[in-house]
Structure formats: structure tokens, C-alpha cells
Image: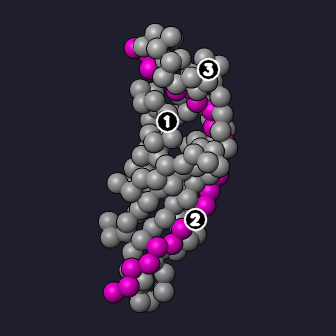
Amino acid sequence: MNKVTVSRKAHFNAAHRLYRKDWSFEKNDAVFGKCNNPNFHGHNYELIVSVTGEIDKETGYVMDMKILKDIIKSEVEDAFDHKNLNIEVPEFATLNPTAENIAVVIYNKMKAKLTSNLELEITLYETPRNFVTYSG
């Protein structure tokens, strides 16, 4: 069988602060710099969700893109858009919301909604030049 990857782009805006509660302000500042701002800072995140699987003989799809769009909306956009990740998103109550950790959280939320025969890869752009990729 042929394996094909389908991808969908998405976007969300969110604020966060990178810091550890168990470190002093000085240590946080030395490690995280401007990202340690106690008043938070924001990003216009760009997301690419890629799903790989075999082409269904009946539909010709790897996955219905409308279903993928709906999962991204419910699991990512509704959950993260215009939110303070540290304060309003439960997954980051004790997890530092770095781009790496955000990508893993998105992966876990999305993977739980996909059938087990599909592979998933998340690419998250924090800035046009800084991005992370995670595939489990």
C-alpha cells in the first residue's frame, strides 16, 4: 500500500512566560532572558499538522481534511487561541510552555483523536525563524 502525508496549516495567538517557579528571578532571567518577563509576552504561532497513512480505497483519502480541520479547531485553536498559556491552559499549570512542550501537548491532544493506524507530526512555528517538530 501507498503511504501518503496530508497536512493542514493553522494559526493561534497566545501569551506565555518561560520560567521555573523553583528558580530565583535572577536564574530564570539568565536562562530565559526576555521570555522570563513577569508580565508575559506573546507569539503568533503557526502550526502544521501532518497525518501519514495509507490511502483508503473507497474514499481516496488518507484522512478527511474536514475532520482534521475540526480536530485542530477543538483541540488547539479553541484551547490555545488568545489565551495566556501559563494561566488559562491546564496542561501548562506545571509545565513550562516552551515551543517544544507546546508541540508535545498539541501532539498528545491530536493523537488521541486519530485512529491508531495514522501517524502524526506536529510542526510549530513560534516565530518565522524558530520552529520545532515532534512526531511522538
Q: Amino acid at mark 1?
A: Thr
Q: Nearer the viewer, residue 35 or 116?
A: 35
Which numbered dot is residue 37? 3
In this picture, residue 129 sits left or right of residue 68? right
Residue positioned 61% across, 20% down in the render: 37
Disc nearer the start of the sequence (2/3): 2
Q: Position of residue 71 (x, y in %)?
A: 52, 58
Q: Nearer the viewer, residue 64 or 2?
A: 2
Disc 1 vs disc 2: which is toward the camera? Answer: 1
Establish if 124 lies above or below 52. Answer: above
Q: Which residues are magenta?
A: 1-22
Disc 2 vs disc 3: which is toward the camera? Answer: 3
Give the alpha-carbon distance from disc 2 to disc 3, as whole Å. 32 Å
- SS under mark 3: loop
Establish if 93 lies above or below 74. Answer: above
Disc nearer the start of the sequence (1/2): 2
Rendered-image quadrant of the N terminus: bottom left
Rendered-image quadrant of the C terminus: bottom left
Q: Residues within 10 Å of mark 3 (few under 14, many from 20)?
A: some
Residue positioned 44% across, 89% down in the render: 58
Q: Residues within 10 Å of mark 2 (few under 14, many from 20)?
A: few
Q: Would residue 75 be counted in the magenta stretch? A: no
Give the alpha-carbon distance from disc 1 to disc 2, as whole Å. 22 Å
In this picture, residue 110 sits left or right of residue 1? right
- SS under mark 1: loop
Give the alpha-carbon distance from disc 3 to disc 1, as whole Å. 14 Å
Q: Amino acid at mark 2?
A: Arg
Residue at which label 2 appears = 8
Residue at which label 1 appears = 98
Q: Amino acid at mark 3?
A: Asn
